[in-house]
Amino acid sequence: MKKFLLSMILLLPLSGLWADQLEDVYARISARPVTKGELAQEQYIKIANRSLVSKGTFIMAADKGVIFDITEPFPSSMVVTEDKLVQTLPGDVVSVMDGKENAAFKNIAKIIHSVFANDVQVLRENFQVTVTGGPKDVVSLVPKDPLLSMLFLKITLTVGDSIDSVSVIETGGNWVNYALNNKTFPEKLTKDEEQRLAQ
């Protein structure tokens, strides 16, 4: 019993420290209104025992959402906003997860959006959060909600001045890594980019 109480006492300051570190990390992310750059994606599919490497570009606007555009080897895109997730697959197949039509979808979209935006309250409510400091901070997010756990087991972000990489461990042993490289920081989105995030 004493050992249990001691371990709980030791964890309390660490939890507070992680909370402070999380605030600091997302303050750095949200300090850049827009981040653009090159995207390198590696996706592992367990059932096929192989990984697929893709390349493209990304646009991240913390207050609006994220656009991932894959150009190689097959064109596709993913747009994430606070209430919608839209995927365009090869062959112009469009998959829309719209929160206006389904409350559960809206909650999932908001949670995924919060990973890229400065909404640490949503992160704390929906994930077990740990932050490891170093030359770059590593933020680990393990979903609390059983519905989220059906989609993914863990999200890990590596953050310097902005998000450098995102790793998602999915259910069934699949995973995907996104590396965000050669970043630039324009002051605002173009009209076309704003329209894509507003759709």
Image: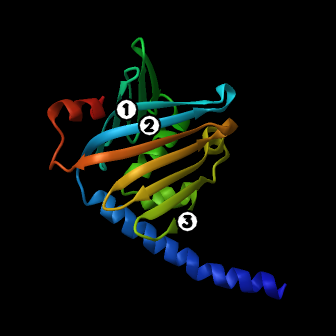
Cα separation, mark 2 vs mark 1, equals 6 Å
User: How would you rate the neighbour count of disc 1 (Cα within 10 Å): few for under 14, some for 14-19, many for 20 or more?
Assistant: many
Q: Residues within 10 Å of mark 3 (few under 14, many from 20)?
A: some
Q: Is residue 64 left or right of residue 90?
A: left
Q: Are marks 2 and 1 in contact (CB under 8 Å)?
A: yes
Foreground label between 1 and 3 = 1
Image location of residue 129, percent across then percent down: 55, 62
Please tell me whether residue 58 is drawn above or below residue 72 in the rendered image. Answer: below
Q: Which mark is residue 130?
A: 3
- Which of discs 3 and 2 lies nearer the camera? The answer is 2
The quarter of the displayed image where residue 88 is located: top left
Residues at discs 1 and 3 in contact (Cβ within 8 Å): no
Residue 37 at x, y = what percent? Answer: 27, 42
Q: Nearer the viewer, residue 111 or 79?
A: 79
Q: Residue, x 65% and y 44% (percent of image)?
A: 149
Which residue is found at the position 37% from the left and 54% from the top? 163
| Precedes in sequence: disc 3 or disc 2 | 2
**Quick one: label 2, few (<14), some, or many (20+) residues within 10 Å?**
many
Which of these two is toward me, 26 or 169? 169
Which residue has dot 1 on it?
55
At a point 55% along the width and 56% down the height, the residue shown is 141
Amino acid type indicated by mark 3: Thr
The quarter of the picture where residue 137 lies is bottom left
Q: Quadrant of the C terminus?
A: top left
Residue at 36% over, 57% down = 118
- Looking at the image, is 48 positioned above or below residue 112? above
Q: Which mark is residue 95?
A: none
Amino acid at circle 2: Gln
Q: Return the x and y of residue 14 as percentages of the image width and height.
A: 57, 78
Q: Helix, strand, or loop for circle 3?
A: strand
Q: Which residue is mark 2?
A: 41
